[in-house]
Image (cartoon, rainbow, N blue to C red):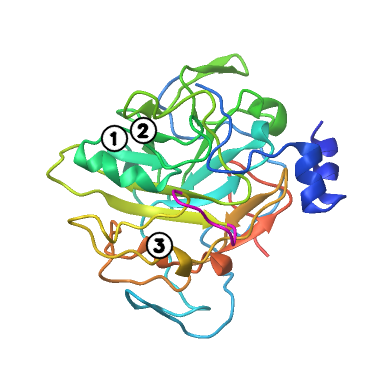
Amino acid sequence: MRAVRLSCALGITLALALAACGDDSGSGGSGGSGGSTTSTTSSTKSATSSTGSTGSTTTTGSTTTSSTGTTTGVGGGVDADHLVINEVVVAGNEDEFVEIHNPTATAVALDDYYLSDNSTYVDVASGAAWDPITNNPGTDFLARFPAGATIPAGGYLVIGFDPGYEASWGGCPDYFVATAPISCNGQMVPVLEQTDKGSITDGSNLSNMREMLVLFTWTGDTNDTLQDVDYVTWGDMFEAGSRADKSAVMGYQADTPVDMQSGAPVPGAGSSIERCGPEVGETLTGGNGLTGHDETSEVLASSFFVEAAPTPGAANVCP
């Protein structure tokens, strides 16, 4: 089953692969559901060697500056001192997952952590109802981690979207984005929590060609602003809702303009994009990030690489 999917993705052009393997492009797709609050994944991996998600691999290039401040320059960058979005599969639907990595030496409690794939995530901090900008209603999501959830030092946490995850990866994710727990390998895998009615549906999923993901933290008090923890967008194309920009929102610093954001490469069906090395070119001050960085300024085209053999729940295999 897996070999058939990979040969479909690798043996023909991207356009034919999407037609043959299934395409959920646009702002969202379809998903699944899940049970407990453990944060160490039970997924198995096909890779046998790796350099780690915070390994020494870097890219080269010229120094750059962002419209919101000075960056470390392409080819430079800083190792993350916070949780990162580490690996993402966007197609086919049953394969999709998001992997979060804790590169620090301390466990992180996830009680106030959220995950979303739409630029309107910022509205949650004002108490506004979930009303995403999307061409595919019911596919985008705004999710909160359950109370008591944690990710250990050096650990990985995997979030799936479809009941077919087990057949694709030979194990279970830590959570599903869905409306009810999903049975996987004889256990009920928990789901992330809705923040508002409809903020998660059984159709929630990731878009293939253009999309964003943001991991953020918020106290739950509407007097407090939220803080970006990590942000990834992929593809050269973008549309309203598919890239974050809080510049016009009261109480926030200017994000990098959407047309200046550097998208990660688009993975084919069955492939992933994975983080390799430091946060390249990221503006280190004056941002909306948890550590004061502008998380929307990272040169994602240099930080992320396409991996033909994804490794959910383990260190990335980087070039």
From the viewer's side, name the closer residue of 144 and 244: 244
Report the residue marked by disc 3.
296
Find numbered disc 3 in the image and state the secondary structure of the residue it sits on.
helix
Q: Is residue 288 magenta?
A: no
Question: Which residue type carries mark 1?
Answer: Asp
The answer to whether 167 is drawn above or below residue 158 in the figure is above
- Judged left or right of residue 3, residue 186 is left
- Sequence-earlier tag: 2 or 1: 1
Considering every residue shown, the one lying at the far left of the view is 223
Q: Residues within 10 Å of mark 3 (few under 14, many from 20)?
A: many
Report the residue marked by disc 2.
145
The answer to whether 305 is drawn above or below residue 109 in the figure is below
**Residue 64 in the image: x percent, y percent?**
45, 82
Q: Residue shown at 33%/38% (left/top)?
A: 110
Mark 2 vs mark 3, foreground winner is 3
Q: Are marks 2 and 1 in contact (CB under 8 Å)?
A: yes
Q: Residue shown at 30%/46% (left/top)?
A: 122
Question: Which residue type carries mark 2?
Answer: Phe
Considering every residue shown, the one lying at the far bottom of the view is 62
Quadrant (top left/top right/bottom left/bottom right) for the C terminus: bottom right
State which region is magenta. 235-241
Q: Quadrant of residue 150?
A: top left
Numbered label attached to residue 111: 1
Q: CA distance from mark 2 to mark 3?
A: 22 Å
- Sequence-earlier tag: 3 or 1: 1
